[in-house]
Amino acid sequence: MATTYNNLYLDARRWLRQAGIEGAQLEARELVCCAAGKSREQFYRDMTLYASAQVEEKLSGLVERRLAGEPVAYIIGEWEFYGLSLEVSPDVLIPRMDTEVLAERAILLARAAGEGARVLDLCAGSGCVGLAVAANVPECRVVLADVSEPALKLCKGNIRRCDLNARVTCVHADAMEEPPAALWDFDVIVCNPPYIPSGDIAALDASVRDYEPRSALDGGADGLDFYRAIAQRWGKALRLGGSLVFEVGIGQSQDVERILTMNGFEQVQSTQDTQGFWRVVEGISNR
């Protein structure tokens, strides 16, 4: 018997909720849209219409993948971050709401730097943070840098997708090494590095541990390897008075504040996320 898009959505939501998936409502909508090839606006418009058997069958397969643990963002191949719809794949971390705090700080600093501000998104992944800055600070220029070639390929696609080719470029760079000669004189370096302690990865939720790239999660024995390397080596890529801005894991803010201070950064401060966790740590270059 034929069923409406609304009933397909309600069924998918029920299955996801029964599996204990927190974002069941949002995820069910995204899966129905993907199965039907519809935008959200088209889905809401067509909720009372009947779906074809092919759409119903495709949705069933997508829900099965989600119930097996695969993140919905990888299933549908895109995710929203700071108002931008970005392509994602298992080559990069899925953009998260927590990281919007990092983007917000970088946007404010880029605006404060004025016309022609230069921003580097280091460990860019999908490019979500740098693209959010570029989209919200029209007078700035942004460089997306990552050590992963598949990630850089995704970044390039997302630059085109967001129509930001004129002001955003990509470069290959290893955050653990000295910055390439071409990367210098930035007003802001923003970075969401790998920060999970190696020993904690096995205990992560299966949707993260089994699907997201370990290279983007593993921050070494204490989770702080990237903070140490970047604070020590990448300050030279900043202008005098430029800012280095990190996302940090829960409970890491004091350690990262200490690392920045030990490496000569001044006015070191932290910012909380919407849940009250200290999520962003930043400092100003004095060299």
Image (tube, rainbow, N blue to C red):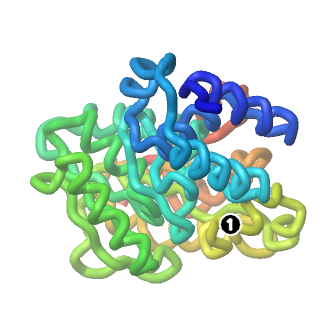
- In this rendering, the answer to whether 42 lies above or below 98 is above
Direction from residue 89 to residue 273 in the image, left or right? right
Residue for point 29% across, 74% down: 171
Direction from residue 32 to residue 39 in the image, left or right? left
Quadrant showing the C terminus: bottom left
Q: Measuring from the top left, give residue 119's x and y in whole percent.
A: 29, 52
User: Disc count in the image?
Assistant: 1
Question: Residue 159 appears in which quarter of the rendering?
Answer: bottom left
- In this rendering, the answer to whether 40 lies above or below 76 is above
Residue for point 27% across, 68% down: 170
- In this rendering, the answer to whether 164 lies above or below 21 is below
Is there any visible trace of residue 285 in the rendered image?
A: no
Give the crowd class for mark 1: few <14, some 14-19, many >=20 residues within 10 Å: some
User: What residue type is disc 1 on?
Assistant: Tyr
Q: Measuring from the top left, give residue 99's x and y in whole percent.
A: 55, 42
Q: Measuring from the top left, give residue 156's x and y in whole percent.
A: 27, 65
Residue for point 52% across, 78% down: 176
* Dot 1: element: loop
Quadrant showing the N terminus: top right
Residue toward you, 254 or 11: 11
Residue toward you, 166 or 277: 166
Q: Measuring from the top left, give residue 244's x and y in whole percent.
A: 44, 53
Is there any visible trace of residue 158 in the rendered image?
A: yes
Task: List the residue tagged with mark 1.
Answer: 211
Residue for point 27% across, 33% down: 136
Direction from residue 275 to residue 34 in the image, left or right? left
